[in-house]
């Protein structure tokens, strides 16, 4: 394609071709412009001097790299490639983290230490308009920026409040997630939830190979007898916890409590190879049991209890066995209706005087009372019997024993 030089290019051509020997008509004619060089000259019919050719190198102030955004550049740096990343197999390289390269820098501040009024300096000073001027150099600027970037690369220690910590430092067990998400007609006010266990599970597929996902077990309760538990499975931990928490709110059990602080009677529950023995306790005894059982009791509103676990301590089996045992207990009224007799309680402060806690409602109490075994009190096992403390006969002078 032929491009005709404008008047400006013609003048530029004359300036560049002052050393040319012009002959003939001396008029400027059309000159082709190529990408390698621009030949601007008067078109003579004679041979030109070797110094008459001018080579102009094109220069572009806008590069292709300047058109990319920061997100696109970071994506090229942090993108995971290779078969090990697409599949769930193979060795994976160390994870690279995106950094803030502008951390510690202030707009307008640089190595030149220039004061720009309205940017990094006031526009008016002593009622006079300031102009751009050079400030005193800051010798500690580079050292301060290097220190900030070095601290950014170091691993940060996350501070977690004591009420949000779990049973151990890094595990999810024991952490509280708050109430379930509200649904139409129910806000779950007064409910709370706790994480029992979070584990990584795998599923072998034909397309993706070994596919990894997270499984979570969460318990939900209102601390007033209502309690439920559920599993949640998702590719990431937070989604699995959210699914389990919202699902547990749909499977609530009501746990009967005696005097709103303990169970009505001793319970023994078994699920698979896990066996739990639960004993009723007086007020002020506290919760002396497995940490998973403590968390369930806290959400159910039980404050005094003793429980011992036999067999496997798998969190799932332990949760199912304990909740089933609590849900299977009978109240004093139900026992009285089933037996047809009065249910009495003996307290230490009352001596041998019995206290009637329930009477049959369907019919009068039976007259043919025979000695029947009380099946709501568990006998002690050999693991629960504590050996007698040995008292030493040695007494040192001046020592008082209470």
Image (spheres, rainbow, N blue to C red):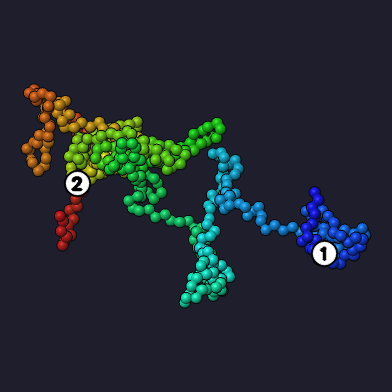
Distance between mark 2 and mark 1 Cα atoms: 107 Å
Q: Nearer the viewer, residue 314 or 53?
A: 53
Q: Tell me if mark 1 has few (under 14), some (14-19) or many (20+) residues whose alpha carbon lies within 10 angstroms of its own.
A: some
Earlier in the chain: of badge 2 and badge 1, it is 1
Tag 2 residue: 284
Vertical comparison of 230 with 121: above or below: above
Q: Nearer the viewer, residue 242 or 153?
A: 242
Looking at the image, residue 118 sits to the left or right of residue 251; the answer is right
The image shows residue 8 at horizontal and vertical percentages of 77, 61
Looking at the image, residue 219 sits to the left or right of residue 31; the answer is left
Quadrant of the image containing the C terminus:
bottom left
The reply to whether residue 69 is visible in this rendering is yes
Which mark is drawn over residue 14? Answer: 1
* Residue at image coords 12%, 27%: 360
The image shows residue 306 at horizontal and vertical percentages of 24, 41
* Residue at image coords 35%, 53%: 161
Q: Quadrant of residue 357?
A: top left
Q: Secondary structure at mark 1?
A: helix
């Amino acid at each position: 394609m032929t491009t005709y030089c404008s008047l400006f290019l013609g003048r530029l051509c004359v300036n560049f071709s002052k050393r040319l020997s012009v002959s003939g008509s001396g008029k400027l004619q059309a000159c082709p412009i190529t990408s390698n060089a621009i030949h601007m000259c008067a078109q003579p019919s004679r041979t030109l001097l070797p110094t008459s050719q001018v080579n102009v190198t094109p220069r572009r102030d806008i590069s292709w790299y300047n058109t990319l955004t920061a997100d696109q550049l970071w994506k090229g740096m942090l993108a995971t490639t290779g078969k090990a990343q697409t599949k769930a197999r193979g060795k994976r390289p160390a994870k690279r983290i995106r950094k803030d390269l502008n951390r510690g820098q202030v707009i307008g501040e640089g190595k030149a230490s220039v004061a720009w009024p309205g940017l990094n300096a006031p526009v008016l000073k002593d009622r006079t308009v300031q102009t751009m001027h050079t400030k005193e150099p800051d010798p500690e600027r580079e050292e301060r920026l290097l220190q900030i970037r070095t601290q950014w690369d170091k691993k940060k220690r996350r501070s977690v409040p004591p009420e949000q910590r779990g049973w151990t430092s890094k595990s999810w067990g024991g952490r509280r997630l708050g109430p379930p998400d509200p649904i139409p007609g129910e806000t779950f006010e007064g409910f709370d939830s706790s994480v029992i266990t979070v584990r990584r599970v795998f599923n072998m597929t034909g397309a993706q190979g070994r596919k990894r996902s997270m499984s979570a077990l969460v318990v939900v309760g209102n601390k007033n007898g209502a309690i439920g538990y559920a599993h949640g499975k998702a590719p990431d931990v937070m989604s699995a916890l959210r699914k389990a928490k919202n699902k547990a709110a749909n499977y609530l059990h009501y746990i009967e409590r005696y005097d709103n602080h303990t169970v009505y009677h001793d319970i023994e529950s078994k699920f698979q190879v896990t066996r739990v023995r639960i004993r009723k306790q007086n007020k002020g005894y506290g919760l002396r049991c497995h940490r998973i059982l403590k968390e369930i009791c806290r959400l159910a509103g039980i404050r005094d209890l003793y429980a011992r676990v036999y067999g496997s301590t798998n969190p799932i089996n332990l949760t199912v066995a304990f909740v089933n045992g609590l849900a299977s207990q009978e109240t004093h009224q139900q026992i009285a209706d089933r037996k047809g007799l009065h249910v009495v309680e003996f307290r230490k402060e009352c001596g041998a005087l019995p206290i009637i806690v329930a009477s049959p409602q369907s019919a009068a109490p039976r007259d043919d009372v025979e000695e029947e075994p009380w099946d709501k009190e568990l006998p002690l096992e050999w693991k629960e019997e504590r050996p007698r403390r040995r008292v030493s006969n040695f007494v040192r002078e001046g020592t008082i024993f209470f």
